[in-house]
Image (spheres, coloured by chain):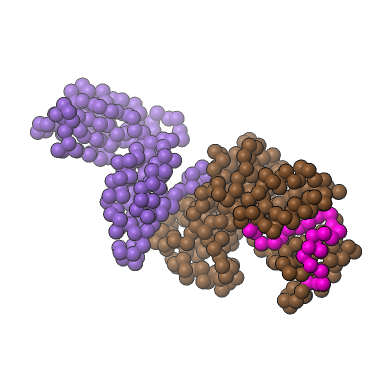
Chain colours: A brown, B purple
Amino acid sequence: MNIAVLGAGAVGTAVADLAGDYGHTVTALADSSSAVVDADGIDVADALAAKRADEPLGDATPDDALEAAYDVLVEATPTTLGDAQPGFGHVARALERDRHVVLANKGPVAERFGEVRELEAESAGTVRFEATVGGAMPVLSTIEDFDSDQITAVRGVLNGTANFILTRMGAEGLGYEHVLAEAQDLGVAEADPTFDVDGTDAALKCVIVANVLADDREYTLEDAEVQGIEDIPGSALELATEDARTIRLIGEVTPAGEVRVGPRLVPEHGTLAVTGTENIVQLETEHAGRLNVSGRGAGGPETATAVLADVGRLPEL
Amino acid sequence: MSDSTDEVRAYTVRLELVDEPGELLRALEPIANNGGNLLSIFHERGNVTPRGHIPVEVDLEATPERFDVVVDALREAGINVIQAGAHHYSESLTIVLTGHIVNTDLSNTLSRIQESTDANVTDLSLSAPEGTDDVSSARLRLATEEGQAAATLATVRDIADEKDLRVIEPLMGGEVA
């Protein structure tokens, strides 16, 4: 397939880099200010070298990339809340052109799911968004395979940064600020880790899962009850550990359809107490008990594999 | 949970005693003599019912069969049993509270949890490494009636909100923490 990639951050560049391995051709790559477009396939190595050197990707504009020749638009611009722009506009434009869309950007399916589905219904194109939940882990495709009616609840650890911080606080008895600074030094936490530690990122993922599971309603971030981990003192982890428990930032879609994210006590050596940046999702099924999916929930190449798996699931246009 | 009738459960019995010497001991004997294991006795001296009796709340453990025998024995001994077996403390719930726990009157927090829910606080651990004037944490174990855990947690959250404390809840539904 011919792929246009919007967004040249960690995920977008990794998609462009790996697309050839999956047998696809990248016909456009854009960041927020420039783009490179070629219907016969761009020179990905050149474009990525330009990006690393902080130079323009090419002579074209991001709008040119949106209007270029492609079968699939990969939307990998940063997630925005509220109106989810400009990501939502990109999705709308590709669908108007009867093209497929694969999202790594959570905004459109977390904040405007119903509109995305309506636009998709009027288009020959299909929208897929495996990469928006749990990075490399096949969460949404597992739900799809099982049939969403067969899944009664979903819970898990959906943010590696928060999990790394809680793991270190529990293991070393260190305070939150100390461990956050360490995580930033290691590149585990971003310079602005707000959405990771205040629960927003995990909540967006849960909202997307809730949208996939729900038949009769649409969820947005507003519908989620969200608590972060910023004000958890080391003493809380110490008391939890004394009692063979630990604290993890857990996101849930409950059987009643509530979306909740917050620090929870879990058994210290239980399935959900994954350590470091690892993520895990537990699916409760109607007839098959509990399924666990764990792995890397973030990272450029990891998330790009989920994007490219989605591209592989798309029908020919 | 097993359906076995041998399973020991916790019960609360509410009694009304005549205000006379020896009355409390007379009320406890049928419990101990019939295989009930006394957990706690809450003797509300000074609080008198409209009929001039003194209410006493007794927590005890027994198998369901033994418990019936205990209640019968109490009644045979002429003890006024107001409420028996309504409380089955069958679920244990562990939470951690964080914030200015000591400065917001921990004792008041605990008694309000007991008063406004059907739960009993059965264990408490406090950690205040920075001193009691700073942020500290407390781990509480609550015994609740079967099926009441969610309602208990909701009430605990309200009490904590009022005092600007954080509640770290157990994950419900998954592996029980």
- Residue at the far top in the pictured view: B76
Say left or right for A99 vs A198: right
Give the residues drawn in magenta, as a range.
A57-80
Residue drawn at 74 percent across, 73 percent down: A51
Residue projecting furthest to the right: A40
In the picture, residue B133 is in which quadrant?
bottom left
By secondary structure, the bulk of the magenta-drawn segment is best described as: loop
Residue A156 in view: no
Residue B24 as seen in the image, left or right of residue A273: left
Give how far across and how far down residue B174 sits, in percent.
52, 45
- The image quadrant of residue A255 is top right
- Using residue A10 as the reference point, say whether residue B157 is left or right of it: left
In the picture as drawn, the residue positioned furthest to the left comes out as B21
Above or below, B152 against A49 in this view is above
Note whether residue A72 is visible: yes
Does residue A98 lie above or below B133 as drawn?
above
Query: A172 or B95, which lies in front?
Result: B95
Identity of the residue drawn at 86% across and 59% down: A69
The count of marks equals: 0
Q: Is residue A64 magenta?
A: yes
Please tell me which residue is depicted at 46% across the width and 35% down the height of the picture: B1
Which part of the image, by quadrant, shows the N terminus of chain A? bottom right
Give how far across and how far down residue B102 sits, in percent. 30, 58
- What residue is rendered at 77% in x and 65% in y? A62
Q: Position of residue A39 (x, y in %)?
A: 88, 63
The answer to which of A63 and A200 lies nearer the viewer is: A63
- Residue B176 forms part of the magenta stretch: no
The answer to which of B18 and A28 lies nearer the viewer is: A28
Query: At which x and y percent is residue A201?
Result: 58, 57
